[in-house]
Image (cartoon, rainbow, N blue to C red):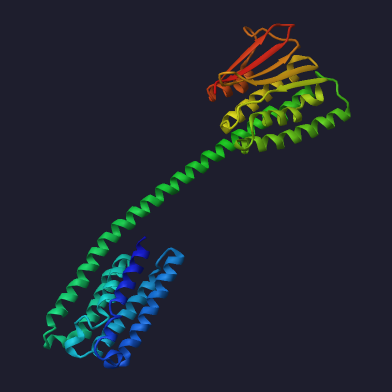
């Protein structure tokens, strides 16, 4: 913002002199060095601010070159005018010199005072012959104007730059915190995936609850690999998937398809445009319920049904006809952590109904 403001200021300052050559006798009334220096100074200023805007910074060496060039044309051009015009508006160097002092006051760093003093001194030296004319007050007023502009710009620029740096630091800290939080969430997600899927598959094989040949083990490994890839996509970009699609993909790739004889699923039309965290939580909780059927139910049949309530909301049920358990006495820490907690995190409710010898139903409800 500051660089663009200074560029606009400098352009206006150079434009102020454009009418002078066309008044009176035109360019022929002035020595060539006056307008040659004008063209060179204008071109340098254009290059200076074009580079600064493109790079989004104003390097110290460019500021130094701007000051050195200003010192040179302040003396050369001012001495080229008749003494009576040296300190008047006819001298084109006055507005650009003011712009140079403002730029140096903001971006001159620890040399800002010396740079401003050098420019103003060069101006006084160049226009000094005006002291013996009626323009001597203009010499004093222009010198005072350059000094005051530089002081105000230096103070204002320091405050603005300090505020901008504080804002940048705050933004950087916020981005770093967000990145750290995202990494932590990703690590947690990967741990959950490993627990719910790959480790669960190894546990099924290690327990030996299901008799499997080499071909089944190979299919199980392929299914689990495909499932991990599927879940990575579902959880990383869940907002791109509808809940019904997410559930169907999960069920098709689940370990149960290899281990159990029958995996039935009925997925009705579900609400669209659900929040990504809801799709993820419901899909993951359903997956964990299926994991428990494979690992503990000692059955070859499971059914998954998903439907919406007439008044809004979603109900998913995972039902098996396996061994069952007593919910009052059984260790439910795994279910509570992997199923109940996930539903509670999105404002839902998980209900587990089971009777020894009569199977289990895990019901997931989410009020839309």
In the displayed structure, 305 sits above or below 76; it is above
Residue 303, visible in the rendered structure: yes
Quadrant (top left/top right/bottom left/bottom right) for the C terminus:
top right
Q: How many marks?
A: 0
Q: Which image quadrant is residue 104 in?
A: bottom left
Instruction: Tell whether 97 sits left or right of 173.
Output: left
Between residues 273 and 139, which one lies in front from this camera angle?
273
Quadrant (top left/top right/bottom left/bottom right) for the N terminus:
bottom left
Instruction: Tell whether 26 sits left or right of 194.
Output: left
Residue 61, visible in the rendered structure: no
Image point (79%, 15%), residue name: 299
Tell me where residue 350 appears, x and y as whole percent.
60, 17
Image point (30%, 80%), residue name: 18
Tell me where residue 65 appears, x and y as whole percent.
37, 77
In the displayed structure, 23 sits above or below 230; it is below
Image point (46%, 66%), residue name: 54
Between residues 258 and 208, which one lies in front from this camera angle?
258
Q: Which image quadrant is residue 14 in?
A: bottom left
Instruction: Tell whether 355 sits left or right of 114.
Output: right
Q: Which image quadrant is residue 286 in?
A: top right
Tell me where residue 114 appears, x and y as whole percent.
27, 73
Tell me where residue 113 appears, x and y as whole percent.
26, 70
Between residues 36 and 15, which one lies in front from this camera angle?
15
């Amino acid at each position: 913002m500051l660089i663009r403001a200074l560029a606009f200021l400098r352009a206006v300052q150079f434009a102020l002199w454009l009418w002078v050559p066309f008044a009176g006798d035109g360019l022929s009334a002035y020595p060539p060095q006056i307008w040659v220096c004008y063209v060179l100074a204008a071109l340098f200023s254009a290059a200076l601010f074009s580079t600064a805007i493109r790079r989004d910074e104003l390097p110290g060496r460019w500021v130094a070159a701007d000051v050195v060039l200003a010192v040179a044309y302040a003396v050369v051009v001012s001495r080229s005018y008749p003494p009576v015009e040296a300190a008047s508006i006819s001298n084109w160097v006055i507005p650009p010199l003011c712009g140079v002092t403002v730029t140096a006051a903001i971006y001159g760093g620890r040399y800002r005072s010396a740079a401003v003093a050098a420019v103003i001194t060069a101006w006084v030296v160049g226009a000094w012959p005006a002291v013996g004319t009626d323009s001597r007050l203009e010499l004093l007023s222009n010198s005072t104007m350059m000094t005051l502009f530089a002081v105000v710009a230096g103070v204002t620029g320091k405050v603005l730059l300090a505020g901008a740096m504080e804002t940048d630091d705050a933004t950087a800290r916020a981005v770093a915190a967000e990145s750290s939080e995202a990494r932590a969430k990703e690590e947690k997600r990967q741990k959950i995936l490993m627990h719910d899927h790959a480790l669960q598959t190894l546990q099924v094989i290690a327990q030996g609850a299901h008799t499997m040949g080499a071909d089944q083990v190979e299919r199980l490994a392929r299914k689990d690999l495909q499932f991990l890839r599927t879940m990575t996509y579902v959880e990383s970009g869940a907002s791109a998937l509808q809940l019904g699609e997410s559930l169907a993909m999960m069920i098709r790739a689940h370990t149960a398809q290899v281990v159990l004889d029958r995996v039935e699923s009925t997925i009705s039309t579900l609400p669209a445009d659900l929040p990504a965290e809801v799709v993820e939580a419901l899909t993951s909780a359903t997956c964990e319920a299926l994991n428990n059927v494979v690992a503990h139910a000692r059955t070859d049949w499971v059914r998954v049904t998903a439907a919406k309530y007439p008044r809004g909301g979603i109900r998913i049920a995972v039902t098996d006809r396996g061994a069952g358990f007593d919910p009052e006495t059984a260790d439910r820490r795994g279910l509570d952590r992997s199923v109940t907690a996930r539903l509670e995190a999105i404002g839902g409710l998980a209900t587990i109904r089971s009777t020894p010898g009569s199977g289990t139903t895990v019901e997931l409800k989410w009020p839309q």
